[in-house]
Image (cartoon, grey):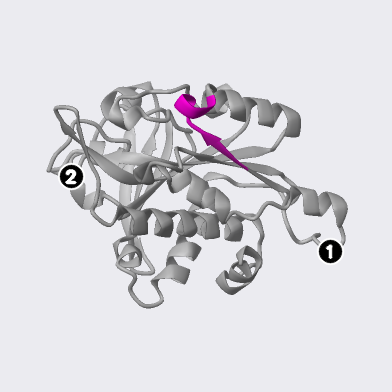
Amino acid sequence: MVGCRTDLATEELPQNGGELEGVRSRQYTRDGFSVTDVEVLDEQGTRSLCKPIGRYLTVDMDSFFRREEDSFPKAVELLSSCMGQLLPLGAVDSVLVAGLGNPSITPDAVGPYAAVSTLATRHLKAQMPDDFAMFRSVSVCQTGVLGTTGMESAELIRAISGALSPAAIVVVDALAARSSERLCRTVQLTDTGIIPGSGVGNDRAELSPRNLGCPVLAVGVPTVVDAGGGLIVTPRDIDKYVKDAGKLIAYALNMSFHHGLTVSDIDMFVG
């Protein structure tokens, strides 16, 4: 099944393996997972790939979503490493994590599920700095959607960022894919930010370093295909996939933010 739109940079690459002017890409395998590293170098690259200048890491997580043995800790460690490449943080840099999307609509709930399992530590470091010295200051929010809040996600995040002044912002959202084979099988990370809803033609205000005034890491999983004719298609077991995706992203964020934490440690803190 082929749709019209996609949020995935890798789906804009030539299928015959050719090169695009202003775009650099390579593919490699790590711990059994395939990673596609795409970099849009300049304005010509933006025209070629229809994506902003920046870097896009796309990880094929098929074995994780099929729940193969020992795939979860390996997937968490790999995603954590990818996050560190795209969002290098100083030892005391604070972070704001925003889960985008509507928790009442399952294919759109990746962000809210990730927010639930991301460790919020800002208040703990403020109240018990010695006990939580090894943790980074992390704040977490869920933005909801314009139809239920009356506010753009960008407006909410800008307001929170203005109050907290984080060194960086991470936004987590559901994405759209062109190929049904990528649904709930791929994680994309980019340092360019995101335009929520763009993959299904419902563009909202941009969330980017330019608009928010600090580095922005966008992390997402494709949950829908635009099938054309007003039809949006999602997998039959989307509820299970979305929960798995939210947990995977949250654990990777926790491991990336708080060096030294293991999956078992995060299990204990998240409960």
Residue 81 appears left or right of 259: left
- Residue 133 location (% of width, % of height): 81, 59
Q: Kindly identify the residue that appears in the image at 29 percent across and 67 percent down.
A: 66
Does residue 60 show up? no
Which amino acid type is shown beneath numbered disc 1?
Asp
Does residue 104 show up? yes
- Residue 233 location (% of width, % of height): 21, 42
Q: In which quarter of the image is residue 159?
A: top right
Residue 220 appears left or right of 266: left
- Give whichever of 31, 163 is nearer the camera: 163
Tell me where the magenta segment starts and ends, as one range. Answer: 141-149
Q: Quadrant of residue 134?
A: bottom right
Residue 228 appears left or right of 77: left
- Give whichever of 123, 147 is nearer the camera: 147
- Residue 262 location (% of width, % of height): 59, 70
- Give whichever of 249, 156 is nearer the camera: 156
Q: Kindly identify the residue that appears in the image at 53 percent across and 27 percent down.
A: 149
Which amino acid type is shown beneath numbered disc 2?
Gly
The correct choice, above or below, for 48 with respect to 81 in the image is: above
- Marks 2 and 1, how far apart at CA: 52 Å
- Quadrant holding the N terminus: top left
Q: Mark 1 points at which residue?
A: 131
Which element is circle 1 on?
loop
Q: Mark 2 points at which residue?
A: 17
Q: Kindly identify the residue that appears in the image at 35 percent across and 40 percent down.
A: 175
Mark 2 or mark 1: name the one nearer the start of the chain: 2
The correct choice, above or below, for 151 with respect to 268 in the image is: above
The correct choice, above or below, for 41 with respect to 76 in the image is: above
